[in-house]
Image (cartoon, coloured by chain):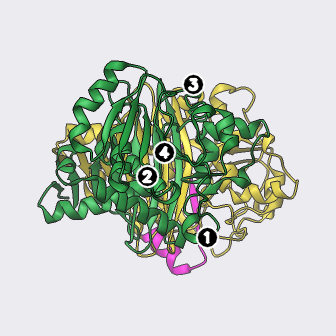
Chain colours: A yellow, B green
Amino acid sequence: MALYLTESEINKIIDIKIAIDSVEESFRMMANGEAVNKPRERLPLGSTSMNYMSAGIDSANITGLKVYVPNPMGTKFYVHIMNAETGEIISIIEANTLGQFRTGAASGVASKFLANRNSSKVLLVGTGFQSFTQALSIDSIFDLEEIYIYSRSEQNRRNFIDLHQSKFKSKLTQVQNIFDPDDVDIINIITNSKTPVIDEKIVNKGTHINAAGSNHSLRRELDTKTILKANNIFVDDLDQAKKECGDLIYPESLGLIQWRNIINFSDIFRFPKKYSRQTDDITIFESQGLAIWDLVLANKLYTLAKENNLGTSIDV
Amino acid sequence: MALYLTESEINKIIDIKIAIDSVEESFRMMANGEAVNKPRERLPLGSTSMNYMSAGIDSANITGLKVYVPNPMGTKFYVHIMNAETGEIISIIEANTLGQFRTGAASGVASKFLANRNSSKVLLVGTGFQSFTQALSIDSIFDLEEIYIYSRSEQNRRNFIDLHQSKFKSKLTQVQNIFDPDDVDIINIITNSKTPVIDEKIVNKGTHINAAGSNHSLRRELDTKTILKANNIFVDDLDQAKKECGDLIYPESLGLIQWRNIINFSDIFRFPKKYSRQTDDITIFESQGLAIWDLVLANKLYTLAKENNLGTSIDV
């Protein structure tokens, strides 16, 4: 017997706190060797592809797959939780909201450990489906004054603020140009851009950058000068970054950076002193998204759903 | 709404003919570029692993995953069929019997196209869960006189014959030693052996060999002399063979054979003249098992199940 959970059921029980806890717990488990993660595979299909990625948690005796087919009419994501000894299906979860929250939470967790603690100004670049939770997670972790909202379309900037301001502690302010604010502590970018959006000129000393949009080797969000300016560059998973992180693959292919200098984020839990920041450091977190985040969050939501009698039993 | 199919439901509708048709159709679609297949991934979990492999069929607009966790108490296999545009789940199928039939069918299909048409004697090595369908598919394709049954345990040989003789056209005869029969046209081996079982001395001119047991680089069924003696060596998929085919990985690592001389089986449909056999040729089919076989067969069984009102609807 397995439990099927729909988007509307997930929406009743998910919040940014449980997502942030899940992502931080994922990284701590990876650091301790208690969890395992495998990068996305893409099976080519006609004009699209099936994407699937896997993870496992020894202590919880579960394993999982995230599966989805990118679709211009709206992609549907699924997370499957399985028993790690028998392979039996425990739960199938519609995972659009789940994915949105875990991706946002990751930028929050990265900022929590990499940005200056007194950060007060954030620049959010991109106002698509994924960007709300990016800003929300940073807002929930820091005592921010202001989040600058940038996207190319003024309408999108205004809509974002109208729709979401009430959910934020800090003030959302639209900016016409990424060069307008000059006092930013954290830059968070999540776009589908194929060419760099962030120009190194806007990256001041002490800035932390989350680049969360790219999960394809041909997409780039940060220009090479920004990459070269950083004191430390972190990735969610080095194996996945080598396949998908265009921001790093491009300068690495030119010999400008080397993979051995790129840091797995989970290493900050193994070597906290080594990676503690100096106030003026520029740090980058490049995120392609990990199945272990999906699995840890899916498992918490599955437990919550059972407690709240949500979901449809698949009785076979 | 998706359809869940149990082992007992699949057992009502599966037979070796539908499995043979599915495997042949899989190879023809791969040859024509209509189908796509990705090798198995193994996510390490405690003392086991989650195994998953994928395939897609453009014309049917479906994609699929085979998922299982090897378990000493009995592994449960699942095949998921999904819509190739939306990713929505069409069917989840318990796939132990399905897997047993498609693996057996593959040796039948390979023998159909690679062995001499007048083959009359088969040596079956291994009497485990997977071996019955190996013999059954060859029996259904050829007018055989006799199938010699070998495994190390006499009890297992006798049990195999007692249990299965009634389902065969040809006579099943147990042999105490693989050297006993001297007139074998087809050798079919499916074991978990880590060291070679087939000695080149039993491989006469004109013999075709199916080696179906190994799907791990450290397992071997054929000795190196047998590999070197073959005129042509075919694999179900070269990408997967390079990861999993111990029989070939071992001699290749010693420089005794080269991957460029190993033939994707589907190429016999693209270049039939090039790979047509001479009577005295020795041929080998090395099989690790492809997700596209699972998907094609699963899709046929799904259609049959709907026609017969079998299965449980997952109504969400």
Cα–Cα gap, marks 3 and 2 = 43 Å
A199 vs B16: above or below: below
User: In this figure, which residue is indicated by the disc labeled 1?
Assistant: B273
Q: Magenta stretch?
A: A139-162
Name the residue beneath numbered marker 3.
Answer: A32
Same chain under badges 4 and 3? The reply is no
Q: Secondary structure at mark 1?
A: loop
Depth check, front residue: B99 or B123: B123
Which residue carries the number 4 mark? B186
Are the numbered discs 2 and 1 placed on the same chain, yes or no? yes
**Tag 2, which secondary structure?**
helix
Q: Please provide percent x and percent y for residue B78.
A: 33, 46
Q: How many angstroms separate mark 1 from mark 3 (CA)?
A: 57 Å
Q: Is residue A54 above or below residue B315?
A: above
- Where disc 3 sits, the SS reads helix
Contact? badges 4 and 2 (CB < 8 Å): no
Judge whether residue A262 is colored magenta.
no
Q: Do the residues marked 4 and 2 share a common chain?
A: yes
Q: Is residue A280 visible?
A: no
Residue A140 located within the stretch drawn in magenta: yes
**Do the CB atoms of the residues marked 4 and 3 lie less than 8 Å apart?**
no
Q: Label 2 crowding class (10 Å Cα cut-off): few <14, some 14-19, many 20+?
A: many
The residue at 43%/46% (across/down) is A65
Label 4 environment density (alpha carbons within 10 Å; few <14, some 14–19, many ≥20): many
Q: Where does label 2 land, which residue?
A: B106
Residue type beneath disc 4: Ile
Q: Secondary structure at mark 4?
A: strand
Residue sitting at the far right: A255
The residue type indicated by label 2 comes to Ala
